[in-house]
Image (cartoon, rainbow, N blue to C red):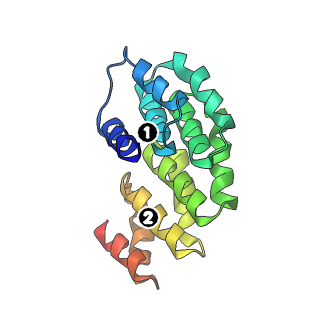
Amino acid sequence: RCIADLCCFFFLMIRRPPRSTLFPYTTLFRSDFNIWVKIAALKVIGDSGKEESTNLIRRKLDSTDLPVRLAAAAALYNLGDKEHFNLIIKTLKGGDVGDRYHAIGHLGRMGTDEALVHLRNLLNDKEDEIVFYSLKAIGTNAKPEYLPLIGDLVRHGNPSVRYQAVLL
């Protein structure tokens, strides 16, 4: 079962469905699959632009798994429902490193100015891992005004952060 879940996850991450065929994806996140399959299905549905799927996605906001709730909030944001964006921001400010990592990933994939402002603020975080993940997320949507901030991180105390800054 675990290998099937992984195969399904990777298929979902690389395949973009036609706008009219979201049924298989909605079935996946309603079923008892691995949470990563649910997250990938939520991402595909959120990226589809089909507003009629918002009710299905809203049900995942009650999930017991925080990564699934964050994926649902990001999918709703991509469909134009900004109401649950605060769930991602609250997790950035008050979660453990793993939860914050998931929130950073969703903000990086959103790539909006609002998301990038929150990522930029994390470049001064006390946790080196958070700085590294934020820098990596900003790198996917690099804007010229962030170059001085990235340049400062070339001299960061953590070699992983310095390496990521040099890559950008």
Report the front residue among 40 and 160: 40
The quadrant of the picture occupied by the N terminus is top left
| Residue receiving disc 2 | 135
Residue at 39%, 77% in the rendered image: 160
The local crowd at label 1, few if under 14, some if 14 to 19, many if 20 or more residues have their Cα within 10 Å, is many
Label 2 sits on a secondary structure element that is: helix
Residue at 57%, 55% in the rendered image: 118
Q: Amino acid at mark 2?
A: Leu
Instruction: Say how many tags the image has.
Output: 2
Tag shown at residue 78? none
Q: Amino acid at mark 1?
A: Ala
User: How many angstroms separate mark 1 from mark 2 (CA)?
Assistant: 23 Å
The local crowd at label 2, few if under 14, some if 14 to 19, many if 20 or more residues have their Cα within 10 Å, is many
Note whether 2 is above or below 56 in the view shown.
Answer: below
Q: Position of residue 31 (x, y in %)?
A: 52, 30
Q: Position of residue 110 (x, y in %)?
A: 47, 43
Tag shown at residue 40? 1
- Which is in the foreground here, disc 1 or disc 2? 1
Label 1 sits on a secondary structure element that is: helix
Report the front residue among 76 and 45: 45
- Confirm whether residue 142 shows in the render: yes
Residue at 35%, 36% in the rendered image: 12
Name the residue furthest front. Answer: 1
Q: Quadrant of residue 122?
A: bottom right
Q: Position of residue 130 (x, y in %)?
A: 53, 67
User: Would residue 110 appear left or right of 13 to someone viewing this image?
Assistant: right
Earlier sequence position, callout 1 versus callout 2: 1
Report the front residue among 16 and 5: 5
Note whether 28 is above or below 158 in the view shown.
Answer: above
- Asked if the residue under mark 2 is in contact with the one under mark 1, i.e. CB atoms within 8 Å, the reply is no
